[in-house]
Amino acid sequence: MTRKIILSLLALLIIQFAKAEKDSLQIQLKSYAPESQHPLLYQVIGQILNSYHYRKLAIDDKLGSTLLNNYLENLDPAKVYFLQSDIDKFQTYKNDLDDEILQGNLTKPFEIYNTYQTRLYDRIQFTFALLNQEMDFSVQDSILVDRDLTTWSKTNKEYDALWVRKTKSEALQLKADGKDFKTYTDILRKRYYNLLKQLAKTKNEDVFSFIANSLSEISDPHTNYYSPRAAEDFATSMSLSLEGIGATLQTENEYTKIREVVKGGPADKSKLLFANDRISGVGQGKDGEIVSVLDWRIDDVVGLIRGKKGTIVRLEIIPHDAINNQKKIIEITRDKIVLEEQSAKSSIQERTINGKKMKVGVVVLPTFYIDVAALQRGDANYKSTTRDVKKLIQDLKKESVQAIIIDLRNNGGGSLQEAVELTGLFINKGPVVAVKDHFGLTKAEEDRDENILWDGPLAVLVNRFSASASEIFAAALQDYDRALIIGEQTYGKGTVQQMTDLNNFVQIEGKKLGQLKLTIAKFYRISGGSTQFNGVVPDIEFPSLYSYKEFGEGASEFALPYDEIKPQYYSKQGTAKANLADIKAKHEQRMKNSAAYQFLLEDIQNITESRDRKYLTLNEAKYKEDLAIADKKKKDREAQKAKLKEQKTEDEGNLILNEAVQILIENLGSAKK
């Protein structure tokens, strides 16, 4: 009886997956075309970018060529769907695309998308056919994973060979994880069937959004078109009413990549998800099926990850330091990121030097916040960064701290007003930042309060994900020589955006047209240099796990450049860098003897090697050998870390903080003049 049941279940599974493959042939993919509002809306977006964007995007033949290349890059970044013959045909359009923006002619961009859809559908069917055949993983073969080094397939033979390798690579990852032929082929069939279903859900508005954003991001990476649906989602997220994992996502090839983990959010608290990790699948609850999200639109991936507070989402990820794209599944409990969790918090670090106990206050600031609603309704106790930090510093002074650290690591910015007012707690008065708008007019934002809350030794901690308002605050204190800046070079986001309702520019049949997030101004330090692109370079700089070419303004070829304006009138208000040469020499000597610092360098080397890997083996024995070597290396490393922690000689997780404390204690003479 048991044998009969098992055979019946196996037969049922075979029928189900055969049905999925057959059903894929029944999915009807329609041809997409602009809706009635799209031509005029396309014109309006082009005119806004040309007239009101900070860069004032020139609509000329150069733009037409750039738009075509960017659109193709966004559709097929890995160069696996289009054929070279498609690209050659599309290249004949490049000198027309700029004129057609002003004409509102979307015929060619929609034609390109329809070709993309046709190619994708064909490749899915080709993959289904491949999955009916046994695969030989004993041959010495590999697939090029750095797709920037290749071009589109020139022949159908090349095209098919690429997809054979691509499918074998996906199958090998599952086989090496212990899956048998039937299991891993069934998983891949379902993955591609789900992708086909996602493709069938595409609407004309989705295609237009893709085209409009391929145009808008040429102005700069922070200028984006939001369809009516996307605009509603954005407004909801700004009110913090959405519940999820607390991570910022972006698309990279077929994957959804973690761009940033929000401080204080569920992902950050879990310590399981990090920037540069790639998401390949999403499952609901502890037992829900992992759904492949490869090649999915990012808003659909976000839709799967979001959910009610307290519920579990499981993510299949490729960690940022993975060897051979080895995956793992992590579990995160969804939660709401509330204002309280983003509030400033303080602690005290104590050290004993020559028998004397020294205290350093640490204020961790996840974002520059202000409760605008409470302020507008007249609530005398409304929350804001400056108010909270002021109280924390007053409490630290009561504890007789001798120096203070403001920790802005992973602080992505927030209220400009709060950045200015917070700076004012550490200087008597003066300009904090200059803002230059798209008309070329420059205005300085100033602290006018002569009172200083803390005039003692001060350091500011930053890393790659300190951006915008964080950079303004750190740059101002660096220019005033009021604080030592310690950590990693910052993000370099020195621009100002404004949400623009497109219905304010044109009315079309009473339809909602969405919004355009538009870059309208740029931030400049009081010393004259922009915080844009270069960010803030610390006085004591640590190497970063995250490459500036992948994380930061340098990641986009369309980022606004660094430039300079006339410096503001200001004078130094401290001597933080008076002994900088000596501070650096002692710091470098400590780092040479620091096991935690050596771990950091090794991590950077491992991530760099993983990122720079050009090929992925398709030989099972070599694949498993690579995994075994990586696993042993990881276990040895964890043992070394455990020993370090046991000896309590260093705390690897707080390397930068500990070094900042040491520097301040050694240089207690570096205070305000």
Image: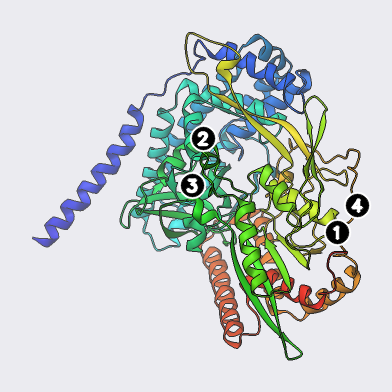
Q: Residue at x 58, y 16 (%)?
A: 504
Q: CA distance from mark 2 to mark 3?
A: 36 Å
What secondary structure is found at the residue carrying circle 4?
Answer: loop
Q: CA distance from mark 4 to mark 3?
A: 63 Å
The residue that mark 3 highlights is 167
What secondary structure is found at the residue carrying circle 3?
Answer: helix
Badge 3: residue crowd in 10 Å (few <14, some 14–19, many ≥20): some
The residue that mark 4 highlights is 571
Q: Amino acid at mark 2?
A: Phe
Q: Is residue 119 above or below residue 285?
A: above
Q: First in sequence: mark 2 or mark 1?
A: 2
Q: Amino acid at mark 4?
A: Ser
Q: First in sequence: mark 1 or mark 3?
A: 3
The residue that mark 1 highlights is 481
Q: Residue at x 52, y 14 (%)?
A: 34
**Which residue is situated farthest in the bottom direction here?**
355
